[in-house]
Image (cartoon, grey):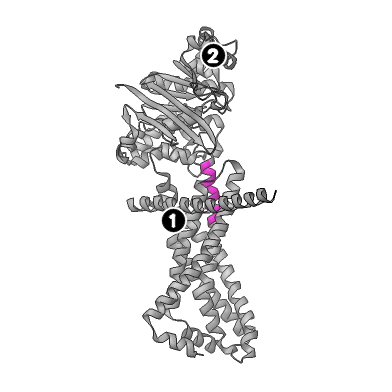
């Protein structure tokens, strides 16, 4: 009996590992197909523009709202801690730094994965279930070129802009809240914000966002293209698109932070001593 | 056209643990209209999708117009594929595009015609399938199922294919629309000399349009070494088949002559009104 249970567990573990590698392999194959299609040329304007509008313009409100609240939440959360150390005047630095290097890119990407990634997976999944993807092939077109490439291009091109919007709105809302509610001197807020946040931090955040955009587009389109039959399959594809994109965003955030920090200290070694001795 | 239009040899299709097709071979000659029939789940649609290369078989060979598809370059394959048209079971019109854009889709993708030529072809094809040009601005969801099928047919015909695949063309349609679709299939063959391959459960469609009938039997009900195609012949041979499985499928009422005659009577008013 014990041997059977152990065997079942080993089977389950083995199946889980196999499914993980099969899924990852499928994602790599799909990405390669997409890159090969992208090499053949950019999508036509009449195909790309509506997707740019759907992914970019229609995501702006949700990014504005999220960015604004996060800026204010950061101000509220950090104020108490900083006040205990009599450093509340430096609130601008921590809000700006956190938003530009971490929260802005991650939040914009999360919003995009939730709003656009799920929708893309559901749309492509429905097209697959209703044989529209096959119809594209039957009419002599490549479904990956027609459906995936424009979505990939739109995600990659627009996510840095959405991130910049989230950063800007978060910093502004943090400033307004700090000034009007917490009584922080606006001059000090901006002075410390400018002093502690470098161009590299802004660039690092935007570079991260490009990778996040790639992963959202690839994961969502792959889920849609390989969704199961019927409404259940489409629903599962939409959910998995968000879950897997989100995991990919967080995993990539960690890796990119390590890589970008290492690169930064390789380029500017003197920054290490500053970081250790403390610029505060 | 020399040789068979479409040929599959020793095709095997396995999905997960289920074998749908095993060692299926079929030659479709140019100009003929072949109906593939059989009970649900026997692999009719899979066979047709393999012929169109919408599904990759687990093993087996596929030839288009005498050329092995595997040996064709990507460009050649694309060119050959444009000689094949496909009417999907649910029409598979693109929801986000208008009727005009749907019919124009294939022509726009090939890039061989300017917008003026595309427009005139779209209107011609819609007229050919009996649809008014007024619907060009509508979305697929705004027209009936029968009209969607006809738009699907117009879209497939827009590229002037040499071979047309029809996947359950009359399923879900009322008798009037079913007859209309059958007439269109027949008319496409008569006027354009297009080779037709039809997957259907509707024996009236078979009687009206097919020259040859191929019957598939579910793999799961057969012994390993038994041929999956249990019948391949004319309508008369089908009606006179002594195979019990064939007889069970077609029933006692299936006769070729009465079907053709009654069909002509039904068809005349429709043709006149068209």
User: In the rendering, which numbered label is found on residue B266?
Assistant: 2
Label 1 and label 2 in one chain: no
Q: Tell which residue pokes out farthest to the right in this image.
A: A1
- Identify the element where label 2 is drawn: helix
Q: Chain of mark 1?
A: A
How many callouts does the rendering have? 2
Q: Main secondary structure of the magenta part?
A: helix
Q: Which residues are magenta?
A: A117-128
Q: Tell which residue pokes out farthest to the bottom in this image.
A: A86
Front-lying residue, A146 or B267 = A146
Q: Position of residue B260 (x, y in %)?
A: 50, 10
Residue at 35% from the left image edge and 24% from the top image edge: B5
Residue where numbered disc 1 is placed: A152
Tell me if residue A210 can be seen: yes
Q: Nearer the viewer, mark 1 or mark 2?
A: 1
Whether the magenta-drawn stretch holds residue A126 is answered as: yes
Front-lying residue, B64 or B32 = B64
Classify residue B132 as left or right of residue A89: left
Residue at 54% from the left image edge and 73% from the top image edge: A169
Q: Position of residue A119 (x, y in %)?
A: 55, 53
Q: Position of residue B140 (x, y in %)?
A: 52, 38
Whether the magenta-drawn stretch holds residue B266 is answered as: no
Residue at 66% from the left image edge and 50% from the top image edge: A3
Q: Chain of mark 2?
A: B
Classify residue A230 as left or right of residue B53: right
């Amino acid at each position: 009996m014990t041997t059977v249970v152990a065997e079942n567990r080993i089977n389950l573990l083995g199946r889980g590992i196999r499914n993980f590698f099969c899924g990852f392999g499928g994602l790599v194959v799909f990405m390669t197909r997409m890159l090969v299609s992208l090499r053949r040329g950019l999508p036509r304007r009449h195909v790309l523009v509506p997707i740019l509008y759907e992914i970019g313009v229609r995501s702006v409100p949700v990014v504005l709202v999220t960015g604004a609240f996060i800026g204010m939440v950061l101000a509220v959360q950090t104020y108490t801690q900083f006040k205990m150390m009599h450093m509340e005047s430096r609130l601008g630095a921590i809000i700006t730094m956190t938003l530009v290097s971490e929260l802005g890119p991650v939040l914009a990407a999360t919003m995009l994965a939730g709003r656009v990634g799920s929708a893309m997976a559901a749309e492509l999944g429905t097209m697959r279930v209703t044989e529209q993807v096959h119809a594209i092939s039957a009419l002599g077109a490549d479904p990956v070129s027609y459906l995936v490439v424009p979505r990939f291009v739109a995600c990659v091109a627009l996510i840095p802009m959405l991130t910049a919007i989230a950063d800007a709105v978060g910093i502004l809302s943090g400033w307004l809240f700090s000034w009007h509610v917490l009584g922080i001197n606006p001059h000090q807020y901006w002075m410390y914000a400018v002093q502690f946040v470098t161009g590299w931090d802004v660039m690092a955040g935007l570079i991260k966002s490009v990778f996040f955009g790639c992963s959202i587009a690839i994961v969502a389109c792959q889920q849609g293209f390989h969704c199961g039959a019927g409404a259940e399959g489409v629903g599962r594809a939409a959910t998995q698109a968000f879950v897997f994109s989100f995991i990919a965003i967080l995993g990539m955030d960690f890796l990119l932070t390590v890589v970008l920090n290492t690169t930064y200290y390789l380029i500017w070694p003197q920054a290490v001593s500053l970081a250790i001795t403390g610029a505060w | 056209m020399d040789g068979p239009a479409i040929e599959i040899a020793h095709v095997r299709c396995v999905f997960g643990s289920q074998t749908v097709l095993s060692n299926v071979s079929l030659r479709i000659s140019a100009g003929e209209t072949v109906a593939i029939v059989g009970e649900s789940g026997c692999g009719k649609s899979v066979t047709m999708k393999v012929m169109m290369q919408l599904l990759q078989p687990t093993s087996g060979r596929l030839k288009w117009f005498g050329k092995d598809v595997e040996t064709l370059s990507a460009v050649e394959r694309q060119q050959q594929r444009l000689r094949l048209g496909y009417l999907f079971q649910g029409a598979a019109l693109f929801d986000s595009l208008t009727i005009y854009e749907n019919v124009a889709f294939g022509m726009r993708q090939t890039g061989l015609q300017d917008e003026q030529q595309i427009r005139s072809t779209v209107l011609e094809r819609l007229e050919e399938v009996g649809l008014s040009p007024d619907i060009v601005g509508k979305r697929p969801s705004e027209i009936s199922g029968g009209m969607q099928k006809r738009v699907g047919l117009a879209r497939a015909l827009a590229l002037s294919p040499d071979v047309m695949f029809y996947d359950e063309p009359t399923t879900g349609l009322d008798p009037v629309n079913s007859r209309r679709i059958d007439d269109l299939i027949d008319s496409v063959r008569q006027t354009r000399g297009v080779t037709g391959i039809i997957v259907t459960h509707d024996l009236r469609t078979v009687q009206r349009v097919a020259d040859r009938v191929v019957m598939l039997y579910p793999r799961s009900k057969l012994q390993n070494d038994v041929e999956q195609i249990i019948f391949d012949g004319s309508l008369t041979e089908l009606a006179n088949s002594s195979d019990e499985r064939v007889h069970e499928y077609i029933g006692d009422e299936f006769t070729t002559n009465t079907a053709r005659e009654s069909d002509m009577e039904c068809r005349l008013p429709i043709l006149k009104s068209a």
